[in-house]
Amino acid sequence: MALQTSAATTTTGAAAPPAATGRAPELTFSAAINQAIREEMRRDPTIVVIGEDVAGAAGRAHLGLVDAWGGPTRSTRGLVLEFGPERVLDTPISEMGFLGAALGAAMSGLRPIVDLGFVDLIGCCYDQLVNQAAKMHYMMGGQVTIPLTVRMSYGARPPTGQTVGGGAAAQHSQTLYAVLAHVPGLKVVAPTTAYNAKGLLIAAIRDDNPVVILEHRYLGPRARGAVPDEPYTLPLGKADVVRPGRDITLCGIGRMTHVCVEAAERLAAHGLEAEVVDVLSLAPLDVATILESVQHTKRLVVVDEDTPTCSVAHTIAARVADEGFDLLDAPIKTLNSVDAPVPYSAALEAEYTPTPDKVIVAVHSIFGM
Amino acid sequence: MTTVQPEAVTLAATLSRETLRFMYERMALIRAFEERVKALMEAGTPFGVAHFYVGEEAVAVGVCAALRPDDWIASTHRGHGHCIAKGVDVRPMMAELYGKATGTNRGKGGSMHITDVRVGMLGVNPIVGAGAPHAVGAALSAKRRGTDQVAVSFFGDGAANIGAVHESMNLAAVWNVPCIFVCENNGYAQSTPTEYSTAGEIWRRAAGYGLPGELVDGQDVFAVYDAAVRAVDRARSGGGPMLIEARTYRYYGHSYGDDPHRYRLEEEERDALSRDCLARFRAQVVGSGQLSEETLAEIDARVAAGIDEAVAFAEAGAMPAPEEVATQVFA
């Protein structure tokens, strides 16, 4: 099952397991995030967590009420009990204020981890991300570093099979990462498993640049895998070949990597071996790994949950066409969600995002099937 | 005619000669720096966008005279004065305007981004109000790291109406961090008068956040200093943030090339000039006998020589190498 992808199933150096010293219990993606933050906070006293309800019940400890929330994805649950409210800072609802404050703190000796909750909320603090955090190091001639990590959840629900009801709709289901990856100076990563979520988050925390970590809302509580107990990092800016294959490259971003793996397994049952590349880093983009894969498969489908226009999928297609046109035996296909807001109704949301069925149709069309 | 308020006389009498010399030298240096930049631009030197602080020197200097070198400030788009008051070297500042690799920001920022973190200057910031949260963050950092540093957010009357400043005041109050908010109300946001854009009085908004707010005469460096010392003492001892509104006046347009007579009357300008911060300072300290005309003249000469040296330094510097276009995007 795609959601169980873990260290054991990866095939390249990008996600090679660390020197194992022992235990690697199975954790959810969210629990791996929690563990990564906890281990880093123990190591480095300058790390603080900032965001709305990252602890919860702020200021109510005297009533015996603490740790009431743990962030919008519950992935900071329990941290306030170990590190206290001085390091796990609940904020008012003021994204521009607290993201800007985290940036100021990053310029003056702290290493903040901001939990923005939803990527949809970047509109409330876009100036601090785009005009401030991303540009400080360059604009100031290299005299400051910005060790700032910004976590945000993204994504619509996969088709649920529901015949009534709906999801979180247009302002809490988006996959707005292309507008972040577009901005020079921001590193943007979208982990896909519990294992790489921990490794990439620790790398982000230790990095001296602003790094955005995108956590798919559906994967958080559901993706499970073996996660070594000790801290480890995975390289930012590196894609990962998660399934080898000779006939076609399926390039997935975020949850779409799981969609690609599922499609590849079904294609294999019919004799077609798809190689799956997990993009992992949207900025910087590891085009070399994708080109290496295309070099032997000669065909490429890119699958991206973001809306198509100016998407990362389109950038990947353009880069491969620019730099590897001669490698290709067939036109590149890109699969995105729809150039429309995310709908509420389960019936419509099911139509919105790419699915294994849609990937298989795209692959068949490339092979003239 | 220059008038001097009795309270300011009282305060000034208690200040050391070193403090007085510091105040005069920094105010004079700001004015000389900008007058030279303006003259260079008028002579055709192709500087980029620059906003002049002339007329407002008492605010930056009055506040920074109350700070330590290791305290932080976050500035506005009109930042030359804050830089000089906090101790940024005018030679790399001038080189930055020339776009030279020897500039404070290696020629990558220009007037609107001058920064020198070594002296606690977190950046000139031309996104109106955007520096306020950075000051809150620096204050949070000081509190978390257990130092007794404070941070100052300078912002203008225009920024008084943007969300970032209000979010910052609330956040600083909620977190009780040592951040001081200094509003430089120079009467105009570009061409829009404060009385049009701003409901109520800015300093009174502090009350909405449970903070003390004070209105001071921004043309009187002693009045600004007096309020700043109290705000800094309070913040440094854990008492939390404070808002100071300094009423001041920019003598020139919003930025180089803007003709302010399209939106304000000469009569108003004449009135502001009659309260010039440097003239008032001179009259007061000479009148009280604290500094002599000779001392002030010596300072003037040193300032003029410093600006000559800054221009020479800037002109001698090399432009950045072409490959620097894409260096330092990441650390």
Image (spheres, rainbow, N blue to C red):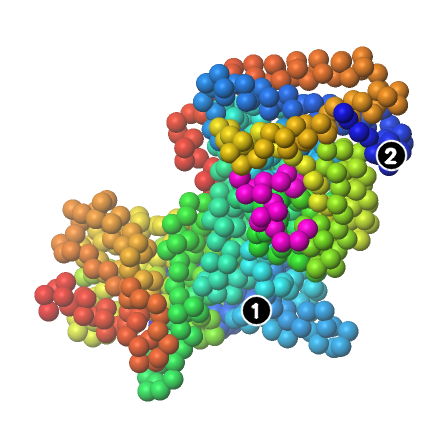
Q: Is residue B265 magenta?
A: no
Location of residue A299 in the rendering, given as x and y in whole percent from the top left corner: 19, 57
Q: Residue at x 25, y 53 (%)?
A: A317
Residue in front for this viewpoint, B287 or A54: B287
Q: Nearer the viewer, residue A109 or B298?
A: B298
Which residue lies at the image location 70% right of the left edge and 64% below the top edge?
A85
Where B124 sits versus A276, above or below?
above
Q: Chain of mark 2?
A: B
Disc 1 with disc 2 on a shared chain: no
Residue highlighted by disc 2: B6
Contact flag, marks 1 and 2 (Cβ < 8 Å): no
Q: Amino acid at mark 2?
A: Pro
Residue that mark 1 sits on: A71
Question: Does the stretch in magenta take in B197?
Answer: yes
Q: Which mark is residue B45?
A: none
Q: Residue furthest left?
A: A368
Which quarter of the rendered picture does the N terminus of chain A lie within? bottom left
Q: Is residue B125 visible?
A: no
Q: Nearer the viewer, residue A88 or B316?
A: B316
Specify the amino acid type for callout 1.
Gly
Tag 2 secondary structure: helix
Q: Give how far apart the Cα atoms at labels 1 and 2 are.
A: 55 Å
| Residue B66 pos. (x, y %) | 78, 37
What span is colored magenta in the figure? B184-201
- Res B224 quadrant in image: top right
Q: Residue at x 47, y 49 (%)?
A: A130
